[in-house]
């Protein structure tokens, strides 16, 4: 293990280097560029034995990744925002083909208006695409997930592509100290990719086929079950990760001070850390504040959410996206999970951080103060220009 | 070079039991190319006629490895497969794509350009039936002038397609591709020779094969090969190659006066006036750089 002071993008690139993908297909887009630049340097310097393919679009980045995965090798790609949407056709394609591709997405605002800064509108618009969706909180977790994602995605019970989301700039471009594992450690944790779902010259296969009304449901159900199986695969993978690397992760969600919390912010991504700091501060004043961080949006941690919020009095879902004409995507999912769960909390939605707008300590403090009044509305933070 | 021919070609079938229309030229183009390339061909076909007729689970019609790509993603998926198989240490295989005219010259052109730019070691075959036939004959950029399609109908004001067929061979050649050719299923020896030749060259290879569609062209189903011959004989379609930076014509016009007969045997051209036909003849002459009787 070595220490490194790196950005989130660079930490992720280090994790991918250690995971040894045979093929990397990449197209540049801000704020993802650094991760593919670092990977191309590693290939150029011989630190990573991988075929780095300069595709001509994000659609081709994913189409190429699907081809490489169908050929039976481990593959990586990365994108963001407009790029994610441009490749959107290929997302359910990869998932339906059960190709365990890992992709980093630098969470970024979606045009119009044009904006290169971070929010989660891009990835949250794709939660039904059949991809496992993970939201990282810091650079160390991003690095570790670059490695763990392959273990989970490639597990034969899962065989599902995996999207690791890093908040654009706030995480991709923020420098932090990280532990970079040794290659031998990673090799003992992550075996080479092995699958029967591949092109085979001895026993040819027809892949990516059509399934009409008679068979379609079977394939879709199987895809759904594979994704759900990830919920059972994550805990033992994290246990093994702990044994080898000494870092403990908390499964589908992470609870902070939830044992007796009455006022809870549910959120995801790197703003979670700030929310936890604010909750700590409020505890000093005797306010029973807590934070529930959603680590996986897919498969959705409904049981974990239900038990985590069972005794909460008021909950705010804080997220960086809006499903126009309704509410935040995460809010709708949390609310749906709580229906019939026995939770009697009031629940509101605060949409914040759009287009990279800062979410401050005071903003979060204000949310916790508001929760005393048990609001149930959907509101924006920063709706007036300033 | 002496290429494969009717006597030497394998009796093995790799694309068999599909549900293509009677007289399908595209199915013949795929079947023959796979016979030339053999069992280690890894075929990529985008959404389109050939994937629609060959991949209906559980009726899967390819005896070699085959996969459907996204409509726009034929070439990029080929790139990924080639890279993946190479990474597995394999070498005795040929990655081959079969995409239609719309899948190649319209929605797939960006991915094809990227593939040629990277010089990925694959063979891309465009089977050209001159419209989006799988969806019911809509105009593509390879639909010829005058043709009536369901989106360029022969109306009283606009008489069919008003644009000329895109020159795909020159577009591809402009990338500096190692090998590109045009072919016709009317001249199978020539087509088979080109597929064989392509399989022996490193880098990206492109073959544009004319493959008539009786359903979309409004022709008799036993006329497919005849039409594919006539298009070449009249000079409306050229058999050519691009290699080492140079173009070469493989066959001269043998039936300069046959254009009217070629057009009149297809319903898609039934509405053409004498003036329209003269325009088609003049365009042919301009493309060949000479005036023919």
Image (cartoon, rainbow, N blue to C red):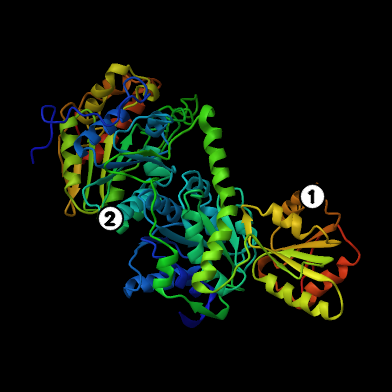
A219 on left or right of B196: right
Residue A369 percent coordinates (x, y): 87, 71
Q: Write down the chain letter for disc 2.
A: B
- Residue A323 visible? The answer is no
Task: Check disc 1: other Cα within 10 Å, few if <14, some if 14-19, many if 20+.
Answer: some
Of A259 and B227, which appears nearest the observer?
A: A259
Query: Which element carries disc 2, helix, strand or loop?
Result: helix
Residue A381 percent coordinates (x, y): 78, 67
Q: How many marks?
A: 2
Residue A7 percent coordinates (x, y): 53, 77
For residue A290, what is the image quadrant? bottom right
Look at 21% across and 41% down and name the residue there: B289
Look at 65% across and 71% down and name the residue there: A270
B196 on left or right of A107: left
Identify the residue position indicated by label 2 in the image: B86
**In the image, is residue B218 above or below residue B88?**
above
Of B113 and A170, which appears nearest the observer?
A: A170
Of A290 and A56, which appears nearest the observer?
A: A290
**In the image, is residue A239 above or below residue B112?**
below
Identify the residue position indicated by label 1 in the image: A341
Look at 81% across and 62% down and name the residue there: A315
């Amino acid at each position: 293990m070595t220490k490194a002071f790196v950005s989130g993008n660079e930490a992720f690139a280090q994790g991918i280097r250690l995971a040894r993908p045979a093929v990397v297909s990449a197209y540049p887009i801000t704020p993802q560029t650094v991760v593919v630049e670092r990977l191309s340097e590693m290939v150029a310097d011989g630190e990573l034995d991988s075929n780095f393919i300069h595709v001509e679009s994000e659609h081709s980045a994913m189409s190429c990744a699907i081809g490489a995965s169908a050929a039976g090798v481990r593959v990586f790609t990365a994108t963001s925002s407009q790029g994610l949407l441009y490749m959107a056709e290929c997302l359910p394609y990869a998932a339906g083909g059960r190709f365990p591709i890992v992709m980093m997405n630098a969470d970024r605002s979606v045009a119009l208006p044009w904006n290169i800064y971070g929010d989660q509108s891009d990835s949250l618009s794709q939660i039904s695409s059949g991809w496992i969706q993970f939201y990282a909180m810091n650079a160390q977790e991003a690095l570790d997930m670059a490695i763990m994602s392959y273990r989970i995605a490639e597990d034969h019970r899962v065989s599902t592509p995996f999207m690791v989301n890093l908040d654009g700039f706030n995480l991709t471009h923020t420098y932090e100290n990280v532990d970079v594992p040794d290659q031998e450690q990673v090799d003992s944790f992550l075996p080479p990719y092995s699958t029967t779902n591949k092109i085979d010259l001895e026993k040819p296969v027809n892949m990516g086929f059509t399934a009409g009304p008679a068979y379609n449901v079977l394939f879709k159900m199987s895809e759904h079950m594979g994704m759900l199986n990830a919920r059972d695969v994550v805990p033992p993978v994290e246990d093994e990760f702990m044994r080898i690397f000494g870092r403990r992760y908390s499964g589908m969600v992470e609870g902070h001070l939830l044992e007796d919390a009455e006022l809870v912010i549910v959120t995801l991504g790197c703003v979670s850390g700030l929310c936890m700091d604010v909750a700590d501060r409020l505890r000093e004043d005797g306010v029973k504040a807590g934070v529930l961080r959603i680590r996986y949006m897919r498969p959705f941690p409904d049981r974990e959410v239900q038990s985590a919020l069972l005794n909460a009095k008021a909950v705010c879902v804080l997220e960086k996206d809006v499903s126009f004409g309704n509410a935040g995507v995460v809010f709708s999912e949390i609310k749906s999970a709580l229906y019939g769960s026995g939770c009697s909390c009031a629940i509101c939605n605060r949409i914040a951080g759009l287009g990279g707008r800062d979410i401050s300590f005071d903003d979060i403090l204000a949310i916790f103060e508001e929760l005393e009044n048990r609001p149930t509305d959907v509101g924006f933070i920063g709706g007036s220009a300033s | 070079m002496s290429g494969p021919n009717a006597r030497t070609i394998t009796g093995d079938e790799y694309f068999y039991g599909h549900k293509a229309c009677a007289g399908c030229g595209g199915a013949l183009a795929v079947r023959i190319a796979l016979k030339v390339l053999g069992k280690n061909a890894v075929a990529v076909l985008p959404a389109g006629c050939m994937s629609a007729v060959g991949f209906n689970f559980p009726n899967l019609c390819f005896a070699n490895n085959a996969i459907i790509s996204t409509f726009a993603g034929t070439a990029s998926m080929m790139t990924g497969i080639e890279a993946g198989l190479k990474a597995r240490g394999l070498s005795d295989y040929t990655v081959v794509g079969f995409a239609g005219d719309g899948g190649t010259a319209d929605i797939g052109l960006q991915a094809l350009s990227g593939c040629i730019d990277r010089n990925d070691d694959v063979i891309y075959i465009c089977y050209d039936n001159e419209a989006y036939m799988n969806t019911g004959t809509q105009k593509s950029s390879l639909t010829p002038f005058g043709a009536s399609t369901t989106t360029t109908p022969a109306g009283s004001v606009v008489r069919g397609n008003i644009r000329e067929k895109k020159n795909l061979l020159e577009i591809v050649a402009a990338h500096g591709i190692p090998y590109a050719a045009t072919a016709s299923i009317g001249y199978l020896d020539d087509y088979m020779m080109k597929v064989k030749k392509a399989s022996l060259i490193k880098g990206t290879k492109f073959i544009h094969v004319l493959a008539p569609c009786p359903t979309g062209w409004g022709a008799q189903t036993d006329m497919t090969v005849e039409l594919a011959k006539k298009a070449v004989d009249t000079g409306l379609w050229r058999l050519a190659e691009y290699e080492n930076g140079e173009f070469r014509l493989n066959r001269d016009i043998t039936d300069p006066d046959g254009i009217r007969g070629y057009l009149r045997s297809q319903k898609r051209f039934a509405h053409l006036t004498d003036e329209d036909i003269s325009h088609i003849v003049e365009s042919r002459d301009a493309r060949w750089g000479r005036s023919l009787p």
